[in-house]
Amino acid sequence: MSPALIGLLLDALQETLFMVGISAVLASLAGVPLGIVLVVTGTGHILENKPINRILGAVVNATRSTPFIILLIAIIPLTRVIVGTSIGTAAATVPLTIAAAPFVARLAEASLREVDAGLIEAAVAMGASPWQIVAKVLLPEAWPGIVAGLTITVVSLIGYSAMAGAVGGGGLGDLGIRYGYQRFQPEVMAAVVVVLIVLVQAVQSVGDLIARKLNKKITRGAA
């Protein structure tokens, strides 16, 4: 590839990292608390509330079941209200966040449900408040699983960001389509694929490392 195309590849990588980074942070800030609410309002839990649990569960399931490309187009009016435009990397973060937050919520919920019920019962018996149980029992025990779930989410966001490039979202997907497909430059498409593979491997490795360290910390604390 020419130096010009290498420059375009680096710019596209920077745009992808921006989209994925912002979306992952926002989705985590929305998804993890949502997962906590889904758990604690469940049947027999510390803040059982079936109407809230069912409503939130239905909203999460509806969003998760919507294909990303359809969601991307369907919320264009909302994207324009929030960002001011429906094209570009900043605009792409809106549908990426909305698509990822329910995914994070379900993964966090699954991790939180794996916490030993005996620990929760012991905390209740000691007079701990619901907030204390969440902050000092549920979250510390579930963090390795939550981090693993967030890692999966980031990997999924990388794929979604490439899809967003098909509709003017920028990033590596946009570069691959404009140069690799529309301009018949297979070397550009190959370079985009390689960069995406390396990026996914790096994210997965870092996420696995953090999850293992958290798991060892919990194991040592229990010992």
Image: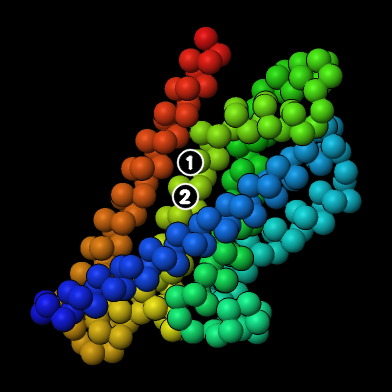
Quadrant of res 195: bottom left
Q: Mark 1 and mark 2 in contact (Cβ < 8 Å)?
A: yes
x, y percentage for residue 138?
67, 30
Q: Please, what is the three-letter code of the amino acid marked with disc 1?
A: Ala
State the SS at label 2: helix
Furthest residue toward bottom:
183
Q: CA distance from mark 2 to mark 1?
A: 6 Å
Question: Would you call the spot at circle 2 few (<14 residues within 10 Å), some (14-19), or many (20 or more)?
Answer: some
**Of 37 and 53, which appears nearest the observer?**
37
Tell me if I can see residue 45 in this picture: yes
Q: Is residue 65 left or right of residue 126?
A: left
Residue 78 sits above or below residue 119 on the image:
below
Furthest residue toward left:
2
x, y percentage for residue 34?
70, 50
- Residue at point 20%, 69% (across, down): 191
x, y percentage for residue 16?
38, 68
Quadrant of the rendering where the N terminus is positioned: bottom left
* Count of marks, rendered view: 2
Q: Please, what is the three-letter code of the amino acid marked with disc 2?
A: Ile
**Of 123 and 145, which appears nearest the observer?**
123
Badge 1 is on which residue? Answer: 148
- Residue at point 52%, 45% (across, down): 149
State the SS at label 1: helix
Q: Is residue 113 left or right of residue 156?
A: right
Q: Is residue 147 left or right of residue 32?
A: left
Q: Is residue 1 left or right of residue 174?
A: left
Badge 2 is on which residue? Answer: 152
